[in-house]
Amino acid sequence: MKADRKDIHNSDIPAVCKSCEARHRGICGALSTDQLLHLSKYTNRTTYDSATELIPEGEDVERYSNILSGVIKLSKLLADGRQQIVGLQFAPDFLGRPFKNKSETTAETATQVEVCTFPKSILETMIHQSPELEHLLYEQSLKELDDARDWMMTLGRKTAAEKVASFLYLIGTHIDPTRGINDSSIGFEIPLKRADIADFLGLTIETVSRQLTKLRKAGTIELENNRSVTIKDMNVLRNACEQST
């Protein structure tokens, strides 16, 4: 982490970028100082409350964003109005699809979210100019593909208990970008309502609640007010992701 932050006191780096996680861990880490200075002229940092629609499905794409904090859920609608949550994004993920003219999903805030937004045309010009930026976006796309394949297995083959454990493990490993990889315990607020968790996992609300209760009684998690979760040992939770109970 210290190596990643070696330029944090560089006076040439725009002030808005110096303490930004996306600068050190996201796509902006591939930009030169001159490119950051250029991009910063067009950026806008905004905080949104939960349940705010950021990008409707099918809308023309005009801007991209770096997620600085919070959780965003991506969903698609069927013709009859049913919703399917198809993914979650966390800081410092990149929100958007380069060179796509229309959004293929709806992006909605699951929690309070802060984003750094910039014009589509500016970033796409930089992609052509910077092989490092293009490579980083390519890597993120491949990572999202790998994550989608893993989640397909979760939805298709795992038991209800394993699905709920996998959901909590997903949140626990992504909710805090500054958390050390060796930290074994973590506490967080579940970013989704029970109905959204059920939708995301292909379960009923009652099943989700029942499996959370089982995890609490087993000592795998501590649960307060139905939303506040403490995981004392992430390794124990990880084992629960692939072990029927």
Image (cartoon, rainbow, N blue to C red):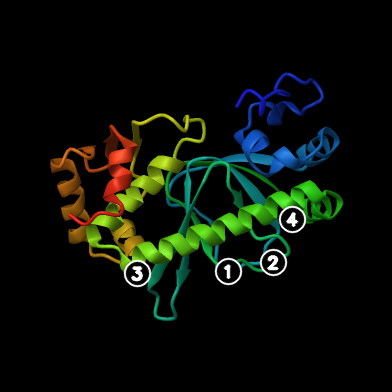
Q: Which of labels 2 and 3 is toward the front? A: 3
In the depicted view, which residue is nearer to us: 109 or 189?
A: 189
* Residue 120 tag number: 4
The single residue placed furthest to the left in the displayed view is 217
Above or below residue 119? Residue 155 is below
How far apart are the alpha carbons under marks 2 and 3? 29 Å
Please state which amino acid type lies under the numbered disc 4.
Answer: Lys
Q: Secondary structure at mark 2?
A: loop
Q: Is residue 155 above or below residue 66?
A: below
Residue 194 placement, left or right of 211: right
Q: Which residue is mark 2?
A: 100
Q: Percent from the top left, x then y, of residue 35? A: 83, 39
Residue 104, label in figure: 1
| Residue 156 marker | 3
Label 4 sits on a secondary structure element that is helix
Task: Return the disc, 1 or 4, that comes first in the chain's sequence.
Answer: 1
Label 2 with label 3: CB-CB less than 8 Å:
no
SS type, badge 1: loop
Tell me if mark 1 has few (under 14), some (14-19) or many (20+) residues whose alpha carbon lies within 10 angstroms of its own.
some
Nearest the eye: 192 or 153: 153
Q: Residue at x 33, y 38 (%)?
A: 234
Between the residue at mark 3 and the residue at mark 4, the CA separation in whole angstroms equals: 36 Å
User: CB of mark 2 within 8 Å of CB of mark 1?
Assistant: yes
Q: Earlier in the sequence, mark 3 or mark 1?
A: 1
Residue type at tag 1: Glu
Q: Residue at x 32, y 67 (%)?
A: 157
Q: Earlier in the sequence, mark 3 or mark 4?
A: 4
Residue under the point 34% across and 52% down: 166
- Label 3, secondary structure: give it: helix
The image quarter containing residue 226 is top left
Residue type at numbered disc 3 = Gly
Q: What crowding class fits label 3: few (fewer than 14 Cα within 10 Å), some (14-19), or many (20 or more)? A: few
